[in-house]
Amino acid sequence: MQYPKEIAEIYLLQGKYLLRDSTGGEVLLLINYKGNKFSHRFIALEPSTRFTRAIRRFAKRLLERKHGMNMAK
């Protein structure tokens, strides 16, 4: 799966995704596959709105792959 170009690095840590952008912003992405929901928390530096949108797109794609349904709202 290709991820948005705004995301520079992705790490998987015990069911949680740590996402970094090129400017040093870090976000912890939590995905609840059973509830079909996701949430994100900023760890280091407030990321740009572009990076935040890329995180949402990435999470929605992960849920689509798991459940086979479109989460775009």
Image: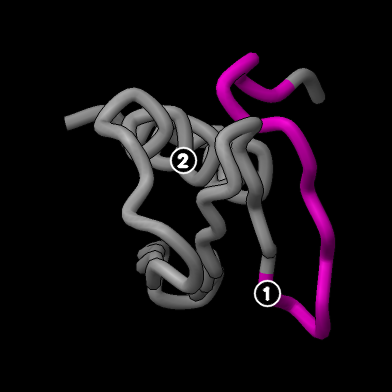
Q: Quadrant of the C terminus?
A: top left
Q: Which residues are magenta?
A: 3-16
The answer to which of 4 and 50 lies nearer the viewer is 50
Q: Amino acid at mark 2?
A: Ile
Residue 30 in picture, x, y percent from top left: 52, 72
Q: Is residue 31 visible?
A: no
Q: Place residue 56 in its image quadrant.
A: top left
Q: Amino acid at mark 1?
A: Lys
Location of residue 66 with respect to 52 vertically, above or below: below
Residue for badge 1: 16
Q: Residue at x 73, y 32 (%)?
A: 8
Location of residue 37 with respect to 54 vertically, above or below: below
Residue for badge 2: 55
Q: Residue at x 48, y 73 (%)?
A: 43
Mark 1 → mark 2, Cα distance in angstroms: 13 Å
Q: Residue at x 34, y 24 (%)?
A: 50
Of mark 1 and mark 2, the one earlier in the sequence is: 1
Location of residue 48 with respect to 24 vertically, above or below: above
Q: Residues within 10 Å of mark 2 (few under 14, many from 20)?
A: many
Q: Place residue 17 in its image quadrant.
A: bottom right
Residue 62 in picture, x, y percent from top left: 62, 43
SS state under label 2: helix
Judge left or right: residue 3 versus residue 10: left
SS state under label 1: strand
